[in-house]
Image (cartoon, rainbow, N blue to C red):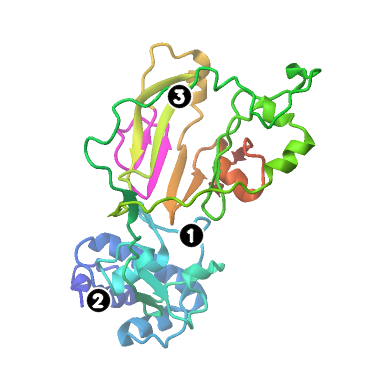
Amino acid sequence: MSMLSSVTSPFTPPIVKRLLGWNKGEGEDKWSEKAVKSLVKKLKKTGGLDELEKSITTQNPKTKCITIPRSLDGRLQVSHRKGLPHVIYCRLWRWPDLQSHHELRALEFCEYAFSLKRDEVCVNPYHYTRVEAPVLPPVLVPRQPQGDVPSELPLLDSNFGSSVPENTNLPENFDSNSFNIPETPPPGYMSEDGDQDQQSPVSMDSMVSSPSNWDSATETIPTSPSPPLDVMPVTYCEPAFWCSISYYELNTRVGETFHASQPSVTVDGYTDPSNADRFCLGLLSNVNRSQVVETTRCHVGKGVRLYYIGGEVFAECLSESSIFVQSPNCNQRYGWHPATVCKIPPGMGIYF
């Protein structure tokens, strides 16, 4: 049991002191007290305080679900920090070294487990069990002895890019100007099952191939089996940064690229020095900045906050002005055109 109860404020409610007395962690006393106060305030409205104290003092998983409303992005903000609510309170009262929600699994009888994505979230720390963080299997890559890698790659045939494939017929009366095709098609996007659907520039020749050629293209082409490769395992490692942010004024990039390493990052228009979880645009200077850009920058304000949650990105508009997002991943998720631009009003958010 922690000694937090002896260092709390004399104005701290008795129930908060008792709950803090079961804190498993060390340090961050003030933040822990705020986290408990926040939970107590929410549970007073639902009458779950007695069940919470019973669960923590008896350490009995057979207690009832202790629920709080699920927020828009699933996270709970305490002071200046945000985290998943069940992770916060499991770390507070059971496992102080808990790293992420991937290490938690709800018990079968928990009706409001975080993974169920219901409107209420169970934060009973004894309704979760700890599991080892999953380790991805190593990727097998071919062994390449030193000296076997060519220093130069062979050049393609100079006529390769302009040649017509043998299985297409180009009509004599074909007018290339009759097709309104953008020079740069929308980029590829990630499908729901994780496969990359990469859109490549479409050959004009392949678009006008005859129906007979379309039929022949569907035939299976026999391939010879590949010989076994000499492979070696390479362990997968998460990248140090989950996103990179570049700031542009019209078509000019201003300042250095910001690399996000924290689970959330705020991009705003203020002039405080940037740190690991904040990118301030107000400090960036541009000698060629126009008056239109200056006026636009005044509307950035509190900007936008980006969250990296379970492999997905959530954007929340903190500014008093709307923000606009173009994300092929987001558009594919909601069935929109890949080039759609989405308007996010103040106080709203969206998953990419």
The residue depicted at 61 percent of the width and 46 percent of the height is 221
Q: Nearer the viewer, residue 82 or 211?
A: 211
- Give the amino acid type for the residue marked by disc 2 in the picture: Gly
Q: Badge 3 local density, few (<14 within 10 Å), some, or many (20+)?
A: few
Q: Secondary structure at mark 3?
A: strand
Does the image show residue 286?
yes
Q: Residue at x 30, y 45 (%)?
A: 240
Of 10 and 308, the residue lying toward us: 308
Earlier-in-chain disc, 3 versus 2: 2
The image quadrant that residue 55 belongs to is bottom left
Q: Earlier in the sequence, mark 1 or mark 3?
A: 1
The answer to whether the residues at label 1 and label 3 have Cβ atoms under 8 Å apart is: no
**Circle 2 residues within 10 Å: few <14, some 14–19, many ≥20:** some
Position of residue 100 measured from the top left corner of the image (x, y, whole percent): 34, 62
Which residue is labeled 3 in the image?
248
Front label number (2 vs 1): 1
- Which residue is identified by label 1? 74
Q: Is residue 178 above or below residue 308?
A: above
Q: Disc 3 versus disc 2: distance between alpha carbons?
A: 51 Å
Residue designated by label 2 = 21
Magenta stretch? 262-281
Give the image quarter of residue 50: bottom left
Q: In the rendered structure, does residue 263 fall within the stretch colored magenta?
A: yes
Give above or below for 237 relative to 251: below
Q: Is residue 352 left or right of residue 209?
A: left
Q: Which mark is residue 275?
A: none
Q: Amino acid at mark 3?
A: Tyr
Which SS class for mark 2? Answer: loop
Decide: marks 2, 1 in contact (CB < 8 A)?
no
